Image (cartoon, rainbow, N blue to C red):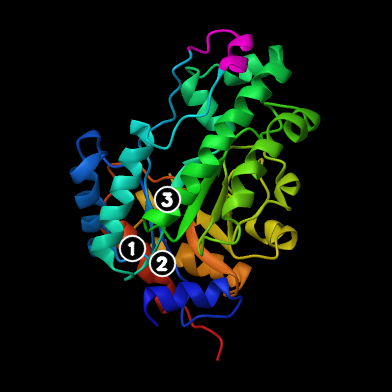
Amino acid sequence: MKQVERMRTVLAGRVPDRVPASFWFHFPDDQAHGEASVKAHIEYYRQVQPDFLKIMNEHPYRSEIQLKNPTDWRKLKPAPLKSEFFQAQLDEIKQISDILQGECLTTTTIFNPFSSGNHASGHRVTQHLKADPQSVSIGLAVIAESLAEFALACLDAGADGIYFSAQGGEADRFSEHEFLQFIKPHDLAVLKGINEKGELNILHICGDNIRLHLYCDYPGHVINWAETSPSNLSLKAGKRLFNRPILGGLDNRGVIVNGKPTEIESAIHAIIRSFGPENLIIGADCTLPTDIDREKIRLAIEAPGTYPMPA
């Protein structure tokens, strides 16, 4: 199978010729934007041949309103789609898609309203939400409205799906009530618009000590979380929660970074053996280090090919 067929087989709930795999990292600053970013993505894809390509998003959400105090969130207006930080990402998606011509599936990063609000507020969103949750929630609803429009535009630009990076669900950050009341509704406002349109929508649940069960009803074709964190559920435990393909298995600062080729292969074979080859995509907890040896990524992507699949 080629990459697209392999991924579509997994997404359909069937067992492919081998377990697919994909990894990503933040490109260096001089390759993070514009033509340099497009070139870096294509070179990386050609070099390591992942089963799908994640298009990175280095264009954080911005607000014309300075969010210095909790009540400032009530002043937010939707960011128009013509905003520079949206258009820059859309341009990169279109160029990458035009070059690949459907050779592999792509998914592009969108940070959830909470995380986008954190970018826009200079990392004050947690503090502000604790102090005045109603005001901050009003602002997050506005951000969600903008992100919902942006997500559809990403798909129209050529991405096959959205990689939705969801923060705010950590048990040591907010109570369950706070999450359900002030974060989850805004996530769902973005996700419901792409649920039927994207082909490779990935829900990345970011952080340690996450309450994975609170995400069971989130839309998404594939689920990913930091399963190697001692405070998070394992892949096998998460498999029982989600009736969908699971992406992950490797510590993004572990054997794929420091291991020998045989150790990388052994680790990936152990993941497949433990989880089973169905509904599995080999990946990492999160982004790999920027300076990782790409040969190790290539080896990790090839490693599932030497695992004996069931007849």
- The local secondary structure at tag 3 comes to helix
Q: Which residue is mark 3?
A: 154
Residues shaded magenta:
66-75
Picture quarter containing residue 253? top left
Q: Which residue is mark 2?
A: 265
**Amino acid on which the number 2 mark rests in the picture:** Glu
Position of the N terminus by quadrant: bottom left
Left or right: residue 240 versus residue 272 is: right
**Amino acid on which the number 1 mark rests in the picture:** Pro
Image coordinates of residue 83 in percent, x first then y, are: 37, 32
- Give the spatial CA distance, label 2 vs label 1: 6 Å
**Amino acid on which the number 3 mark rests in the picture:** Cys
- Give the spatial CA distance, label 3 vs label 2: 35 Å
Residue 285 appears in the picture as rendered: no
- Looking at the image, residue 150 lies above or below residue 64: below
Nearest to N terminus: mark 1 or mark 3: 3
- Give the spatial CA distance, label 1 vs label 3: 36 Å
| Dot label at residue 261 | 1
